[in-house]
Each structure stands twice: as C-alpha cells, then as structure tokens.
Amino acid sequence: MESLIDKSVIIFDGECNLCNGVVGWLLKFAPEEIFEFIPFQSPRGQELLKRYDYPLEQLETVILIDQNGPLTHSDGFLKIVSKIPRWKLVAALLAFVPRMIRDGIYNLASRNRVKWFGQSKSCTINF
C-alpha cells in the first residue's frame, strides 16, 4: 500500500465525461505529488474496491483514500478540493453546508451525470 501513504488515491469512473472532466481539472490545478488517479474499471481500481468493500460493477461516488481511510460523496469531494492550495478556502466554506444538503446535491449529480454529461469510450488516465 505504498502509494496510499505517499499520495491520496482518487477512484473515479473512467467512462464518465463529468468524472473525466473533474480529473482533468485536478490534473491542471493540483500539485502533481498530491493525488494518484485510478479508474474503477482498471485492475488496480477493482483491487481497491474489493479491499474497502465497495461494489465492483458500478461506481456511485468518487472515492478518496488517504492515510485516514476512504471518504465518499461530498465529504470525499471536499477533502479532495481542500488539498489544492488555491481551493482550500472554498472547500472550508462549503464544509459549513450541512452534509445532508451537500450529499443531496452530490447524489442528484451522481445519478444524472451520464444523462447530463454523457459517457466516454476513453478515460483521462491510461490504465
């Protein structure tokens, strides 16, 4: 589990246009040494999903795995954003929004992401 100590791991849907767009944004703004991006469809993604007891067939949420373990939904997303120096304040402010509201918005976007943004045959990250 060497990379889980050195870098925070982000497991995402490599066939989702919204997810690929967010990964592209993170690649642009996040310091290189912070994250390791892993599509859930990859062998490594499947291995991590098994290890942390998540379903293997479909990903309903981004999963951040860091030294404290996995985080999902809006908590995971806010933790990801908080690790980017330029966006730390935005994440801190959004954390004041009650989780029930944040997760409601997150789940609405998650359920409709393919309908709203489409599906991709290729992934931002080669695996």
Image: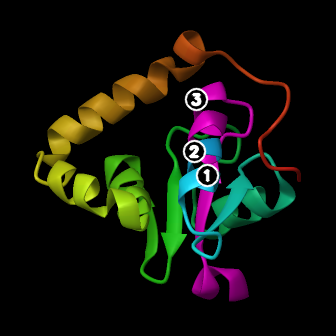
**Residue 106: horizontal and vertical position, in percent?**
35, 34
Q: Is residue 1 in view?
A: no
The residues bearing labels 2 and 1 have C-alpha atoms spaced at a distance of 5 Å
**Residue 81: horizontal and vertical position, in percent?**
40, 57
Is 11 positioned to the left or the right of 124 in the image?
left
Identify the residue at image location x=66%, y=37%.
20
User: What is the tally of numbered marks visible in this picture?
Assistant: 3
Query: Which is nearer the eye, 56 or 8?
Result: 8
SS for callout 1: helix
Disc 2 marks which residue?
A: 25
Amino acid under label 3?
Leu
Q: How is the image coloured?
A: rainbow
Q: Which mark is residue 28?
A: 1
Question: On the rendered image, what quadrant is the N terminus found in?
Answer: bottom right
- Label 1 near label 2: C-beta < 8 Å? yes
Q: Quadrant of residue 78?
A: bottom left
Is 14 positioned to the left or the right of 80 in the image?
right
**Residue 34: horizontal and vertical position, in percent?**
57, 73
Amino acid under label 1?
Lys
- Label 2 near label 3: C-beta < 8 Å? no
Q: Of discs 1 and 3, which sits in the foreground?
A: 1
Is 44 positioned to the left or the right of 19 in the image?
right
Disc 3 marks which residue?
A: 18
